[in-house]
Image (cartoon, rainbow, N blue to C red):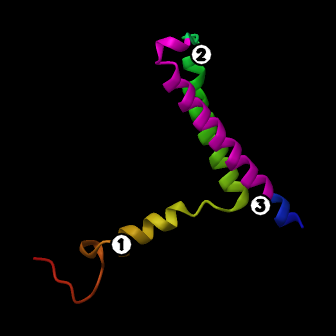
Amino acid sequence: MRRKYTNLTGNALMILGLVVMVGGVGYAVLNQLPQLHLPQYMVHGAIFSIFVGALLWLAGACISGREKVCDKYYWHRHYGDKRCRRTSSHTHH
């Protein structure tokens, strides 16, 4: 049961981070419209919320065990592109 709750907690943090990031981007974009008369001092908080949301997302990924991004980049770097594949028959000119 412990693994189930850590997975649930991590997913909840990832969702919360996504919502905070999207909300921050949305407020920063909507603040550019002069018709809405939104306060300018809140823009700094909206931009800061993007970084807070990213930290929440990463914390959730760490808790739930979804931080396998480096493995995907390793696979892509070594096996994704034909030019980057390491084979013994490939000679460098």
Q: Quadrant of the N terminus?
A: bottom right
Q: Is residue 33 magenta?
A: yes
Label 1 sits on a secondary structure element that is helix
Dominant SS type (magenta): helix
In the image, the segment drawn in magenta is 8-36
Q: Amino acid at mark 1?
A: Gly
Asked if residue 80 is positioned above or below residue 14 in the image, the reply reads below
Label 3 sits on a secondary structure element that is helix
Q: Percent x, y for residue 82?
A: 27, 76
Give residue 7's mark. 3
Between discs 2 and 1, the one toward the N terminus: 2
Asked if residue 1 is positioned above or below residue 22 in the image, the reply reads below
Between discs 1 and 3, the one toward the N terminus: 3
Q: Percent x, y for residue 55?
A: 63, 41
Which residue lies most toward the left here?
A: 93
Q: Percent x, y for residue 28?
A: 52, 24
Q: Residue at x 57, y 11 (%)?
A: 41
The residue wearing badge 2 is: 42
Examine the image and state in which quarter residue 21 appears. Answer: top right
Q: Amino acid at mark 3?
A: Asn
Using the numbered discs, state the Cα–Cα distance from disc 3 to disc 2 in whole angstroms: 34 Å
Q: Is residue 24 left or right of residue 13?
A: left
Q: Is residue 1 magenta?
A: no
Q: Residue at x 87, y 64 (%)?
A: 2
Using the numbered discs, state the Cα–Cα distance from disc 1 to disc 3 in whole angstroms: 30 Å
Between discs 3 and 2, the one toward the N terminus: 3
Q: Is residue 13 left or right of residue 3?
A: left
The residue wearing badge 1 is: 80
